Image (tube, helix red, strand yellow):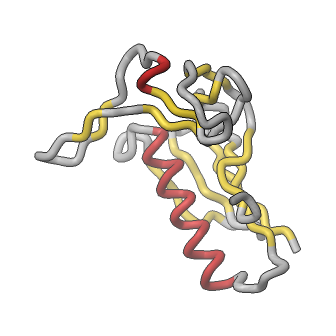
Amino acid sequence: MKHTFTLEKTEKNIILLFAPNGGVLHSFDKEIFPEIQTIRGASIAIVKQHQKKFFNLPTDEVELIDKTNIIHEVCSECGSIDFDIKAWVSEKDGYISKPEDAESEDCWCNTCEAHTEPEQKGGDYTLYNSTDK
């Protein structure tokens, strides 16, 4: 059985995480959570907790679709979102800052297993799928 969670942006600058039944599972105020990467990471964690608590069956597939249409970075070679970008982390407050212009040596595609340039994309995409390795 497939359970689909979705992230959607509202007109009031709030991002909502919807459960498979259509109810709001969590809301993120963009003033409190200004970085979309933080919201996406927190959403994956929430979905995984929900999956463990409610869908602990081996045949259940859980996915999280990002429908915010907020730009995300992908591998320019294969289009994968399984893409790492080197960043600076502040020891003082844990703030993560990404380089303005990431170069290929600062980026790694886990699908291609190579350093590649990032490419920006918009539109809906699967942020998490429990069947992915």
Residue 25 picture location, percent across and down: 60, 66
Q: Is residue 97 left or right of residue 79?
A: left
Rendered-image quadrant of the C terminus = bottom right
Residue 105 picture location, percent across and down: 44, 22
Instruction: Place residue 125 in its image quadrant.
Output: top right
Residue farthest to the left, as pictured = 92
Residue 35 versus residue 114: which sits nearer the camera? 114
Q: How many labels does the image show?
A: 0
Instruction: Place residue 109 in its image quadrant.
Output: top right
Residue farthest to the front, as pictured = 113
In this rendering, is residue 35 above or below 17? Answer: above
Residue 19 picture location, percent across and down: 69, 66
Q: In this view, does 36 lie to the left or right of 114?
A: left
Instruction: Place residue 75 in its image quadrant.
Output: top right
Residue at the image point whose x is 88% and y is 74% from the top? 1
Residue at the image point whose x is 66% and y is 24% from the top? 121
In this rendering, is residue 121 above or below 22? Answer: above
Residue farthest to the right, as pictured = 1
Residue at the image point whose x is 65% and y is 45% from the top? 8
Q: In this view, does 92 lie to the left or right of 32?
A: left
Residue at the image point whose x is 44% and y is 16% from the top? 103
Residue 84 picture location, percent across and down: 49, 37
In this rendering, is residue 4 above or below 104? Answer: below
